[in-house]
Image: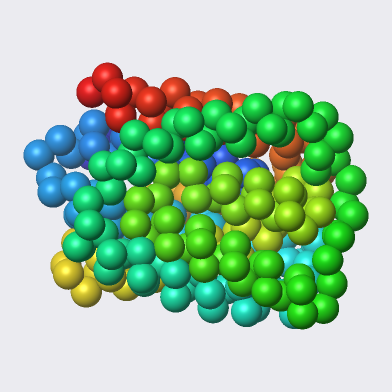
């Protein structure tokens, strides 16, 4: 019972963080490994997806109702993210992710430095692309980060947010909303793969899902209420935490 309470609380916090800017796995995955140290990693990753996808999907729905999104670009990007995630999951069965594990904190550090240097980036919503160009760029982002999520995963939501801000000219609120749409696709692809291999504890995932949805509701409302500035600040905090966590995992542990 104590284990379920700890996991539920972690899932609640993860749902909140993920709804605002992505990065909920930073909270939930270590909690799962801490509470169930003897479990197979694949089972914990699968259970994480089984619980977290519901909060991500709900956040996507809530944002879609309140934020005007470019569906002509996001729907093809959704399909590309789904395809990319499947391809990444398949590739990781053939090629180890050790090199990416070591490179990730440096990549995230560059993202953080760029964001801090460009103080006005993502504060105003000023899409710079339209028509077919926007569709192709959004789909390329979906395919690339979808592949990354299937292959490795940490920071997927944050990468989606950064690329939508940097290349499409979205503010952080619209970028986070768009990221939730695509992150739902990548989570679904991963969940299908893990479930097909029997790597999901559905009874644990069900408890996590309820808590994750509650956290997602609170996070989405706060992001919508406080706008792009709040999401930008949360983005900086989450990316900083990701840098520390991935550096620890890659070079210390």
Q: In this view, does 45 lie to the left or right of 231?
A: left
Q: Residue at image x 40%, y 36%? A: 103
Q: In this view, does 13 lie to the left or right of 73?
A: left
The quadrant where residue 21 appears: top right
Q: Position of residue 246 (x, y in %)?
A: 39, 31
Q: Position of residue 110 (x, y in %)?
A: 59, 32
Check the picture and name the quadrant holding the C terminus. Answer: top left
* Front-lying residue, 47 or 166: 166
Indicate whether 135 appears above or below 224.
below
Coloration mode? rainbow
Indicate whether 77 appears above or below 230.
below
Q: Position of residue 82 (x, y in %)?
A: 47, 73
Q: Residue at image x 68%, y 61%? A: 178
The quadrant where residue 129 appears: bottom right
The count of marks equals 0
The quadrant where residue 150 appears: bottom left
Q: Residue at image x 30%, y 42%? A: 99
Q: Is residue 44 left or right of residue 79?
A: left
Q: In this view, does 87 lie to the left or right of 160?
A: left
Q: Position of residue 17 (x, y in %)?
A: 56, 40
């Amino acid at each position: 019972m104590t284990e379920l309470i700890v996991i539920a609380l972690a899932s609640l916090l993860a749902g909140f963080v993920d709804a605002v800017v992505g990065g909920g796995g930073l909270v939930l995955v270590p909690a799962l490994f801490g509470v169930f140290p003897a479990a197979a990693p694949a089972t914990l990753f699968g259970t994480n997806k089984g619980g977290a996808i519901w909060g991500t999907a709900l956040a996507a729905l809530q944002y879609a109702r309140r934020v005007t999104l470019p569906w002509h670009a996001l729907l093809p990007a959704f399909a590309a993210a789904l395809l990319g995630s499947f391809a990444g999951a398949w590739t990781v069965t053939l090629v180890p992710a050790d090199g990416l594990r070591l490179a990730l904190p440096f990549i995230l550090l560059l993202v953080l430095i760029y964001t801090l240097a460009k103080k006005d980036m993502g504060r105003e919503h000023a899409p710079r692309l339209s028509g077919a160009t926007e569709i192709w760029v959004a789909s390329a982002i979906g395919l690339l980060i979808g592949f990354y999520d299937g292959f490795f995963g940490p920071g997927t939501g944050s990468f989606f947010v950064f690329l939508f801000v940097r290349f499409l000219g979205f503010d952080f609120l619209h970028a986070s909303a768009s990221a939730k749409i695509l992150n739902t696709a990548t989570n679904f692809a991963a969940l299908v793969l893990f479930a097909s291999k029997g790597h999901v504890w559905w009874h644990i995932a069900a408890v996590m899902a309820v808590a994750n949805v509650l956290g997602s509701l609170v996070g989405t409302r706060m992001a919508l209420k406080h706008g792009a500035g709040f999401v930008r600040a949360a983005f900086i905090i989450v990316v900083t935490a990701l840098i520390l966590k991935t550096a620890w995992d890659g070079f210390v542990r």
